[in-house]
Every structure is written in structure tokens, then in C-alpha cells.
Image (cartoon, rainbow, N blue to C red):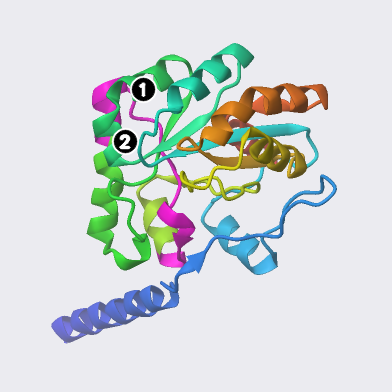
Amino acid sequence: MKRICTLCCGFLMMLAFTSHAEAISNKAIHWGFSKSKHHQPADAGKELNHLLNRYDAIYLGDTKEKAVYLTFDNGYENGYTQQILDVLKKQNVKATFFVTGHFVKDQPELVKRMAEEGHIVGNHSFHHPDLTTKSSDMIKEELDSVTEEVFKITGKQDNLYLRPPRGIFSERVLNETNKLGYQTVFWSAAFVDWKINKQKGWKYAYDHIIKQVHPGAIYLLHTVSKDNAEALDRAITKLKKEGYRFKSIDDLMFEKHMILKTL
């Protein structure tokens, strides 16, 4: 009888686990939001906001504070990252660089410089796949392999910010990456800047950066863009004149943690 009860309990636990797993959808979601207008915060919508909150993912800072956050995606090097780092150093602005395995392997000196100059080296996966098509073990390998390579170069292993490749994710991906200790960071300001054969001049990038600014904005910019590299210094200067402060994602997470502690 005892053995039968044990088997029954095990079976019920298996059913509960299966039911929970099935409840976590792997339907692919392509990140999107209503862009900022007249400096009002961008908005991903009630349903998506609820999902992100459940897994502690972010795309905005404090929308009551005139602070902005610069993040860059580094899939590969196109000759402009050094120029961008020079501008950030000149302006005393800290950013987050989400790197792929290819970038880390190909540009260890740039990764080292990012860390030495106080920037965050985030995770953009090793091979830049659609994570919704990968198993739990494969997701872990994609992310941990970047973390390990960055550690070899910088000696830092606490940069656990993640940007899902291609902006594609699902509830299952959020759940899996959250369990692995990664903080998912989306964005609330972006434009088409990654097409290297269709650059439109620095003014194009500058206008989009200024047009989309809002309190708490997390910018997504690509370092492959010549336009971005040439517009960045002017854009930072302009935003500072408008009263915006540049903060890092670390600042944002620290402030968020302190708010939660007071609740």
C-alpha cells in the first residue's frame, strides 16, 4: 500500500509538472512597442508589460526621471566601435554592449576596453539564434559560452544582462533565461540603423535619437552603423542640454532593487 501511494504521489507530481510546462507558452514574440511621441514614454501594452514583469524583464527606466540608457548590439565589428567608445569616454557616459560569441572571439581588445572603461558587457548569445527554437540545454550553452569568453578577457563574470537575438522571445525563453540568472533587457527607442549598405548620414541617426527621447528611455543602437558613430557625440550633447542624464543599466537595476526593498 505504501509503495502504491508513493507511485501515485510521483504520478501526480509528474502531471503537475507537465501541466506547468504546458502553461508556459513558447509562441514566438517579436519585440515591439508604441514609439514615444512628444517625449511620452514608449509602451509595450498591458499584456506584454504583465509578461515582462512576471520574469523581471525590462525595457524602460523610471519614466518620471529625465534619465536615459545607451545600449549597443555588437553582432560583428564594422570599424566603428572604437569611435563610439571614444565618444563615450569624451562624454563620460557609460553604456551596455550586448556582444555575440563572434564579436568576443574576433575583437577581444575592444571587449577588454569596454570593461576597463566602465561599460557593461552584456550577452547577445553566441550564434545569434532565435532562442524559441532551442532547447533548455541549448539556450544555456548559447548564453553561458559568451559569459565564459567574456570572463576570460575581462575577469568579470557578473555581467548577466541579456538581449534576446533578433528581438525574438517567448514566455518559455523568459522563464529559462531567468532561471539561469540572466536579466533580459529590451529597449524603448530604436530605428533602422543596422543596414550597413543603406546608411543615410549622421543627421538621420541624430534626428531619430532626439525624436524618440523620453524619460527612462533605453536606446538600442548598433555599432555597425557609420551614421550612429558620427551622430553620437552631437546627440549626447543635445540630450544633456535638454536636461537628460545618462545612466547605466546597473544604475537602473540598483534603483529598482532599492524601491522593491522599501515596499
Magenta stretch: give its range: 148-172
Amino acid type at circle 2 is Phe
x 82%, y 25%: residue? 243
- Considering depth in this image, is 254 or 101 the residue closer to the camera? 101
* Quarter of the view holding residue 173: bottom left
Callout 1 crowding tier (Cα within 10 Å): few <14, some 14–19, many ≥20: some
Indicate yes or no whether the magenta region holds residue 168: yes
x 33%, y 78%: residue? 18
Mark 2 element type? helix
Judge whether 245 appears above or below 147 on screen.
above
Query: Horizontally, is 233 left or right of 16 in the view?
Result: right
Q: Position of residue 143 (x, y in %)?
A: 31, 46
Query: Horizontally, is 235 left or right of 219 in the view?
Result: right
- Considering depth in this image, is 108 or 217 the residue closer to the camera? 108
* Quarter of the view holding residue 256: top right
Quadrant in which the C terminus appears:
top right
Amino acid type at circle 1 is Leu
Mark 1 element type? helix
Dot 2 or dot 1, earlier in sequence: 2
Say whether residue 75 is visible: yes
Give the residue pinned by disc 2.
103
Q: Position of residue 209 (x, y in %)?
A: 69, 39
Callout 2 crowding tier (Cα within 10 Å): few <14, some 14–19, many ≥20: some
Q: Position of residue 9 (x, y in %)?
A: 27, 79
